[in-house]
Amino acid sequence: MTVSAHELRVMVDMSATLFHHGHVRLLKAASEIGYVIVALTSDAEVEAHKGYKPELDYEMRKEVLEAIRYVDEVVPCNWLIEESFLNQYCIDLLLHGADNSNPISPQRLKILPRTPGISSSLLRARVLRAAAQIIGGNEID
């Protein structure tokens, strides 16, 4: 996709360890604003901050994101996005869910509400319950 001189460059940062419809909604909202660059958290940063290795490694997560029609570009990033990182990619706006902890000036930050009833953590818990049912017939609470 070619960026016009008038189109905003929008960054969405995520780990996308378990990609779900909440991610799709966030990316769709970003695409309605401008050219979308996903800042994808590295495997080492996910492990350091979430305490586990991602189910899919960085290259696999990147491939999934690049297949999404709302995504124009994917770049590696650290856990937190700083103004200098936005400057490096000429970003006009960082779009994030309500759980944002990035130290970005309010002029360059747009917060969207999270999608109710879904998160990667919730999906992970559902997978564990399903695995427990398959393996031992017991549910994990």
Image (cartoon, rainbow, N blue to C red):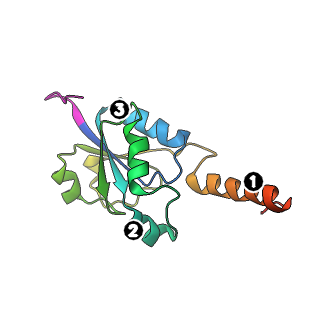
Say which element carries label 2: helix
Cα–Cα gap, marks 1 and 3: 34 Å
Residue at numbered disc 3:
31
The percent position of residue 106, horizontal first and vertical second, equals: 29, 51
Nearer the observer: mark 1 or 3; the answer is 1
The quadrant the C terminus occupies is: bottom right
Near mark 3 (Cα within 10 A), the count class, few <14, some 14-19 or many ≥20, is: many
| Kind of element beneath mark 3 | helix
N-term-proximal mark, 1 vs 3: 3
Compared to 66, does 46 lie above or below? below
Numbered range of the magenta stretch: 1-8
Visible residue check, residue 91 = yes
Inspect the image, locate mark 2, and give the three-letter code of the amino acid beneath it.
Ala
Please report the residue visible at 43 percent of the width from the left and 49 percent of the height from the top.
61
Q: Which residue is mark 1?
A: 130
For this orientation, the residue located farthest to the left is: 5
Name the residue nearer the viewer: 130 or 14. 130
Q: Secondary structure at mark 1?
A: helix
Q: Is residue 4 magenta?
A: yes
Question: Is residue 13 rendered to the left or right of residue 117?
Answer: left
The three-letter amino acid code for the residue at tag 1 is Ala
Residue at left offset 60%, top offset 44% = 116
Q: Which residue lies under the disc numbered 2?
A: 44
Q: Earlier in the sequence, mark 1 or mark 2?
A: 2
Residue depicted at 35% across the width and 29% down the height? 32
Q: CA distance from mark 1 to mark 2?
A: 28 Å
Q: Are circles 1 and 3 on residues that touch, CB within 8 Å?
A: no
- For the point 21% across and 30% down, the residue is 7
Q: Residues within 10 Å of mark 1 (few under 14, many from 20)?
A: some
Q: Is residue 14 magenta?
A: no
